[in-house]
Amino acid sequence: MNDLAPLLTPEGRALLEEVRGTAPADELAVATRLRRDHPADLVSAALGQARLRQRAAAKFAAADAERMFFTPNGVEQSTRASVAAYRARRLTDLGVTSVADLCCGIGGDAIALARAGIRVLAVDRDPLTAAVARANAEALGLTDLMEVQEADVTEVDIAGYDAVFVDPARRSGRGRIFDPEAYSPPLSWAVAAARRAPHAALKIAPGIPHEAVPPEAEAEWISDGGDVKEAVLWFGTGAPGAVRATLLPGPRTLLGRGLPDPEVRPVGRYLYEPDGAVIRAHLVAEVAEEVAGGLIDATIAYLTADELHPTPYATPYEITDQLPFNLKKLKALLREREVGTLTVKKRGSAVEPEELRRKVKPQGPNAATVFLTRVAGAPTMLVGGPARPPEGP
């Protein structure tokens, strides 16, 4: 879709309604029928938009996605609505009533801010992207709180706003960008903008090195449904240098306390897999203390303990077998246990889960989980399953 305007006409909107929910297998037949009465380019644009809306339903509420407008990059790079809403709540808790949203994309974050009652200036330099954000503000009835500008964010006057939110582009034509100074705009520019505002939130890749976090910023890693979504550098929260991991839904937040690395101990009855946000935030030690556990290896973020201590920050598994890495032994064990449903997890192993499944050929009515990892430096296979709380008397 190179031009949004035709889709905003009465004819375009009627077509969007008509093609809503079209299955991929039906697109050719639908397009052939509609081209009898409508321009071919408009039909193609409407079908393309319907396809994007279906994809966007994974990030936005279905009722919103069906009304919003998207670009392929916009769907790919948009924040999940639950994460954007959580950030907006944090800003309202800080007393923020106005935000300059720089690099707003199709407006997903601005929408969450506006719905939280915050007045938003949403800025993007790409003409089509800005037009899509403007159309989304109108589609969702948020134009009173959401102003969209097409401009270079480095030239926008942010004076008078309570906070700045910056979501720099972290992809190029070659794929993901890992160097924060190669973001567009660079992280250093975003930090400078943050320092000029009373409050700020900078969305960055979760893999950012901890040493790249400015000392006056609070660093937060956020996961949703167990998937790590982003890291945020917060300014003006009154907690410089703080580190936290937040798990959605909830939210549940684990605060760093500067604990030393957990000790390495033999594998006990239970294995804990910390949430990805906990691992990215370097807060495995805080979880180890909570579950009274230790590491299975100094370089592997799996924890072990002899007793079950439920925690929202890690998933517990009960371990039944510990084997040196040997596929023949694993295959024999799974055959003996009649395991047909095999979940493969790995950390510190080069073996791919699908490759292992092909080689061991699980068959049978039972289920198991195998961890391909290292224990005290040695390649190891741990077999078990999700831990269940002990039954009461």
Image (cartoon, grey):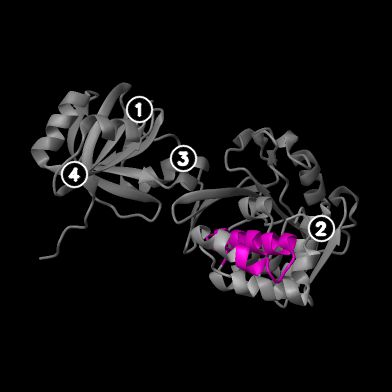
Residue at image mark 4:
340
**Which label sits on residue 254?**
none
Type of the residue with mark 1? Val
* Mark 1, residue position: 351
Q: Amino acid at mark 2?
A: Val
At 19% from the left and 38% from the top, the residue drawn is 362
Q: Nearer the viewer, mark 1 or mark 4?
A: 4
Residue that appears at 54% across and 66% down: 22
Amino acid type for the residue under numbered disc 4: Gly
Q: Mark 4 vs mark 2: give the one in front.
A: 4
372 up-or-down from 162: above or below? above
Q: Quick one: label 3 or label 2, which is nearer the N terminus?
A: 2
Viewer-nearest of discs 3 and 2:
2
> Any magenta on residue 59?
yes
Which quadrant of the figure contains the C terminus? Answer: bottom left
Left or right: residue 346 versus residue 207 is left
Sequence-wise, the earlier of marks 1 and 4 is 4
Of 77 and 102, the residue lying toward us: 77
Which residue was labeled with disc 3? 259
Distance in Å between CA atoms under marks 3 and 1: 32 Å
- First along the sequence among labels 3 and 1: 3
Report which residue position mark 2 lands on.
123
Residues at marks 2 and 1 touching, judged by CB atoms closer than 8 Å: no
Residue 32 percent location from the top left of the image: 62, 63
Number of numbered discs overlaid on the protein picture:
4
**Mark 4–mark 2 contact, CB under 8 Å?**
no
What is the C-alpha distance between the residues marked 1 and 4? 20 Å
Whole-angstrom CA distance, mark 3 to mark 2, is 41 Å
Q: Secondary structure at mark 2?
A: strand
Tell me the chief SS of the magenta region: helix
Q: Quadrant of residue 201?
A: bottom right
